[in-house]
Image (cartoon, rainbow, N blue to C red):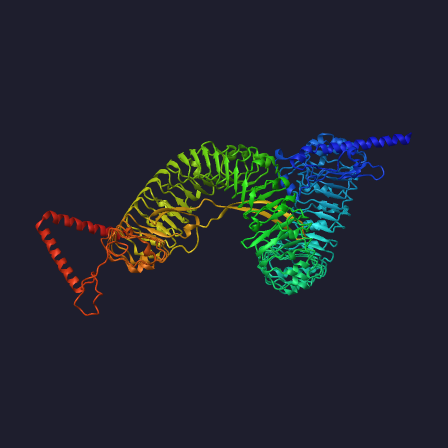
Amino acid sequence: MVGWIQGNNNIYIEEDERKALLEIKASLHHLSNNFYLVDLLPTWVNHESTGGSYCNWERVICDATSTYVTEISLRNLFSMEDEEYAEYDQMDPPTRMIWPLNASLFLYFKELRSLDLSMSFIDSTFVSTGFKRLSTLEKLETLNLSNNYIETNIFRSLWEFTSLKILDLSYINGYKGYSPTHDVSEFPILENLEVLVLKGCGYYGTLQIQGLEKASMLRKLKILDLGDNQFDEGLLSSLSTLTSLKTLDLRKNQLSGLFPSQDCKSLMRLKKLESVSLAYSSFNKSIISCLSFLPSLNILDLRHNDFGSSFPMKELSSLRELKTLDLGECGFETLTINGTMSNLLHLNLDRNKFVLIDDIIKSLISFPFLRFLSLEYSFSESRGRLFANEVPTFPYLEVLILSHNNLTGTLPIKALSSFHRLKVLDLSYNNFVGSIQSTTKLLSSTLKAVSFTNNNGSLVDDELCELTNLIELDLSHNILDGNMPQCFNRLSSLKLLDISSNQFAGILLSSFFINLTSLKYVDFSHNKFEGSFSFSTFSNHTKLEFVQFEMDGDKFEVETEDPIGWIPMFQLKFLMLPNCNINRPKRSIVPSFLLRQHKLRVLDLSHNSLEGQLPNWLLKNNTKLELLKLRNNFFWGTVIHMGYIKAKNIRMLDISENHITGMIPKDIQKSIPRIEYLNFSWNAFNGAIPTSIGDLSELFILDFSNNQFSGEVPEGLLTNLPSLKVVKLSRNKLYGHILSRNLSFGGLLMLHLDGNSFTGNIGNNTREFLNSISLDISDNHFTGSIPSWISNIPDSSQIVMRNNHFEGEFPCGITSFVFLDISQNSFSGPLPSCLDLKNMEHLHMGYNKFTGVVPNAFRNLTKVLTLDLGHNYLSGKIPKFLGELSNLRILLLGNNKFVGHVPKQLCQLNNVSLIDLSENSLTGLIPRCLQNITGPKELAFIQEYVIGYAGPIFTFKSAIPHSVHIRYFDEVEIRDEALFTTKGNSLRYQGNILDYMSGLDLSCNKLEGEIPQELGMLTHILALNLSHNQLTGLIPMNLSNLAKIESLDLSSNRLIGNVPSELVKLTFLEVFNVSYNNLSGRLPELKSQFGTFTKESYKGNPLLCGPPLENMCTKTPPSQGSSTEEGTSKWYDMDKASFYGSSISTWFLFMLGFATVLYINPYWRRRWLEFVEKCIYKFYYFVYDL
């Protein structure tokens, strides 16, 4: 009967445990849907349908005898990577997804010994649903609630958990490192506790233990971790009672100053303490002497303390049992050591400030039994050769890290080969040169990880392949060239192979990878490989997770469909194949093996000309996908179905430069709630921008430019998104008063609204700007005046308001503009002289109604490259100080009312490429010194990156830390532009074309005199326009030296003589105009470019003859002279003596008649004297201007 009752009890208990487990699973339903996991805990099913025991369920362990549950581990049910969880942890509480787990469900597990709920997304609700009653589980020894969001004080609920031996509450409350959270003095004294972890909770106070009775309750505590909290020195006095303590971690607290002497002596009671961490504190050297009272200490972490510049060897010598020592980031400059520390095995000295490399290396002999040595970032401010004078003896050294220093010379392979037990060698980020020598084989046969990345090394032979035990090999960012050493395929143990950013060439053979089946990480990007590579080569690489083949040229192809139907045995997490010409021979289809990938976090297939419908299924299949980049392909279709896909983890989505049409889903925020970078530009999207865009609270960059969006912009886009830095809506069909309301975009870095149909005026900005801004509202229909906040943005900013209907005066302010374009509006009044011009590089004020003179303040434009004041009503003389603006490249002053001479000071602008002084009232001569303008010698208008997206960091777990930081940069779209008349048309030049355009336009003025011969020395010029002036004399023959000229206009002047036949040498000349002058004689032969000019180029010159004119040149009658002259005389040949004689006679008779008229007629005599007087004054002011 007793047995029957006992059996029935067992049945009831088992049934209760099963029901409790199934209820726990049921409570996960909502959360699993949010993470798009179809079936969490798939083995947890009702036994009636399967007949299985719950003891066989995953994450559950039962006692072998009683079959009761003894262990439940629900840690990280969603299989999040550490980086994923860290990113999720940074989210605002309202956007987090929480598991509504009922703590009372665990009361059914009477025999439970271990419960792990770490990384389970539980919050304070868990504590309020019966957590305190779990103290009745008398056998519970291990409780892990770390990495959750329980913000209430859990200490008060733990008083009765007397059976606990291990308690982990680290990072339990989402602490962000700001203000303290709870007082640790409220923590209960649990007598059986052996391990207590309270890391990263923001706790403060002390462990107030008073009286022997309570102290004895903690006598079993062996491990205490209080790191990353808010404790100060007051905590230390309470630690001496923990006599069983073996490990103490107090890193990243508020500990500083001198260690109290009374506390030093009290440490003698901690006889079992073996490991101490006081890293990231502010103690001085006295702390080391104090720690000498710990007789068993063998691990000491004093990283980032204040020990001065010299190594504390005297203090350390008393720590005779020390085996591991971390003194990184302590500011040491010297390493003078007396004596030895023979027990020290692990020494970390990275991120110090050592100067003399040889001295440091020599001093290291004091640690003869070292197995680990790190000097990373320790010589960054000095240069030197490694092992230049002496090679230390480290017969037991296994790990040597010397990365991120300025070490020079050849790779010291021969010296390193003396370290016979070396397993890990990191020489990355130095300045080593030369070959990876043939002595590489001398390195230890036990070597497993090698990094030579970011040096200047080159391969000579195949000796590196002798290191057959290698697991990690990083040769990236060197100058390695030639074909890939085929012998690398013998390194069958390789898990990581990175040869990116070198100059390897040739065909990447599939046979290279056949034996490398252990590969997890492979990166061959940025080399010069050619030919086709079959991705199916990796089909049997079951461990493969990371592949990157980003190429720069057009000669490499990745084939993914050969053989057809191959099945991948891997599950990739990271795949980047941009610019790889994927499946080019097969119409560039999307790789079909991706249909079988479900763990991708990063996928980049951009710049591949892939065709077909937009593969939305990539988001559906890969619920952990964080970055998807399909830019610059030929995908078509819509994103409307994205509304049914839940991509909660996606951070970056770029489908720009495709052929995608249709509207954006109205509830897009439900599909991609955590998006940071969203780029739909250069497609054919239409319809309105949904208001739900304003609910994407983490959005950082939004680019919808170059589409066909219409309607008004949602108000929330510019007001609700505090993280938003970049908005590009350029060149759509948007309209409305987007800037008329009260604005609130103080955190924006870039707002581009150009090329739309926006109207209204600009309203007030209600938030103070946090930084500079790039604002482009050009080519719209904005009206009204400019508010003052535009000129009061802090730091240097770029403002483009070109081609609107603004009016009034431009406001003064503190903004130090770099780029200001307010051209093609209706601004009036004087040019603004109160702007901060010291950083101005591009200033466009043309095509307005400005009046008055150019203000003297413009002499502060010392950095200006472009100055456009054309097409206004400016008057006065052109300022001489413009010649002092030595960086000036473009000067546009045309279509104003300037008078006076062309200032000779403009000849000092050696770098200027475009000068337009046309359509003014300038007089005098063309300065001969213009020959001094030699043109720019370097590029100035190259587009630069102005904003970037720093995405997540993906860390590959390896012996030598290896991480990939996803970064993308957007090119600047505010490009400088200039309107310049050439080839008879006013043309718009934009962007870096301005570096190559060169021209001089002095047309439509009142310039006199001859064309200076010196203009023929402007050999870089592409356009020269001197038309519509009063120039006289001959066309200079040396204009034929203008070898690059494309447009030459000398029309509507008073030039005489012939058209120099030497101009035929101008092979790039497209437009030539000398019409309406007084030219005569035969035109140049119709060859080269002159064969393309019509009679329109010469009209208005009746004395010109020859093709293409109808006026043909005729020969003179035959002379009676010698036969050698017969047939060679031409009608325009003449006797020079007769010509000069008749000219002098004519001149004498004219002057005699002129004098007679002045003598007889007093009126004409008075007019003549007034003319002479006027000329004298004119000459005087001419000299004065010089």
The picture places residue 63, in percent across and down from the top left corner, at 82, 39
Which residue is drawn at the image coordinates 84% and 32% (left, top)? Answer: 10
The picture places residue 951, in percent across and down from the top left corner, at 58, 44
Q: Is 93 placed above or below 391 here?
A: above
Which residue is drawn at the image coordinates 76% and 50% (left, top)? Answer: 296
Give the side of residue 523 with respect to residue 212, left or right: left
Specify the quadrant of the image occupied by residue 868: top left
Query: Which residue occupies the foreground of this view, 1062 or 870?
Result: 1062
Give the side of residue 936 with respect to residue 1135, left or right: right
Split into 4 quadrants, where in the image is the N terminus?
A: top right
Specify the quadrant of the image occupied by residue 18: top right
The picture places residue 975, in percent across and down from the top left corner, at 44, 46
Query: Which residue occupies the foreground of this view, 482 or 12?
Result: 482
Q: Is 1134 placed above or below 977 here?
A: below
Farthest residue to the right: give it.
Answer: 1
Query: Which residue occupies the foreground of this view, 700 or 1061?
Result: 1061
Residue 512 visible, this orientation: yes
The picture places residue 1028, in percent across and down from the top left corner, at 27, 49
